[in-house]
Image: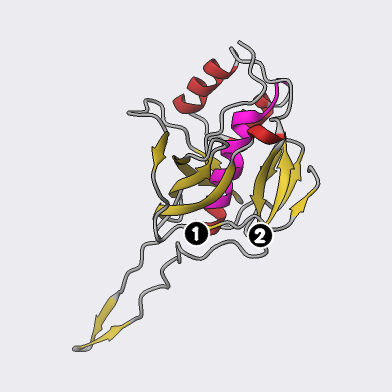
Amino acid sequence: MHCSKGITSLVAFTAVAGMSVLAGCGSSAHHPAPERADVHAGPIHLHWVNFQGEQVPVGDQGPKHIDGPIAAGYDASPAGAALAAIESTIRMSIADDKQWVQVGQQLLAAGAGRDRWATVRIQVSISEPVPTDAAPHVLGYAVTDYTATKADVAVYTRQTDGSLTRNVTAVVRHEDTWLLDLPANPDGPPITAVTHTPPDMVHLPATTKEPTR
């Protein structure tokens, strides 16, 4: 099967805060809870770069390193996790026939989910960038769950026919980056049609765009 457009499949954390109580000599000392990660804080200095015909978001929270099809190095924060989820999903979906193996090895978490994706991807041929008039636009995201090691992010995208979709993704922390964690046995399609974006969505405005990197 030949596919020149690719599949546009466009994750999040909630830090755990706690309070410790130390008892000693008949008295107790209360320590303030650690600051909770702000899942509503968007990327700083957001801009867009082109990959295979699609615009992908970049900010101070990552990616810190872009080398061909590989974008890596994201802050250990909700915004860093979200940017990784969006970047890696797009790159995984439209990497061409010479790029997809490297993308799978470096942007996806090892496991049955990655193996399942590779089995499907090897049957598809992507040899050209996505045409400009066929490229969807990422509107924003909502971090629905966040910890220091794992995040779930819902990504909202405007398709070229005007419809709105939500893509549910997950990332896991690995060294200085987040890896896309694909489900081994998905219980439903990751992308669903929606009628509106949630009020707490972090908007990613289409502002400046940079050349392909």
Which kind of residue does numbered mark 2 sit on? Leu
Q: Residues within 10 Å of mark 2 (few under 14, many from 20)?
A: some
| Residue 200 sits above or below residue 73 on the image | below
Percent x, y for residue 116? Answer: 48, 21
Q: Is residue 7 magenta?
A: no
Res 100 quadrant in image:
top right
Q: CA distance from mark 2 to mark 1?
A: 12 Å
**Residue at 45% of width from left, 56% of height from top?**
148
Identify which residue, 196 or 88, lies in the foreground.
Answer: 196
Residue at label 1? 202
Q: Position of residue 104 (x, y in %)?
A: 61, 29
Residue at 63% of width from left, 18% of height from top? 3
Q: Earlier in the sequence, mark 2 or mark 1?
A: 2
- Whether 47 is drawn above or below 68: the answer is below
Q: The residue under label 1 is which amino acid type?
A: Val
Residue 171 in the image, given as x and y percentages of width and height: 49, 44
Q: Give the magenta range.
A: 82-97
Disc number for residue 46: 2
* Image quarter in which the N terminus is found: top right
Name the residue rendered at 61%, 51% in the picture. 176
Colour scheme in use: secondary structure
Seen in the image, is 200 located left or right of residue 138?
Answer: left
Dot 1: element? strand
Q: Quadrant of residue 16?
A: bottom left
Q: Could you tell me which residue is drawn at 52 percent across and 52 percent down?
A: 140
Majority SS type along the magenta span: helix
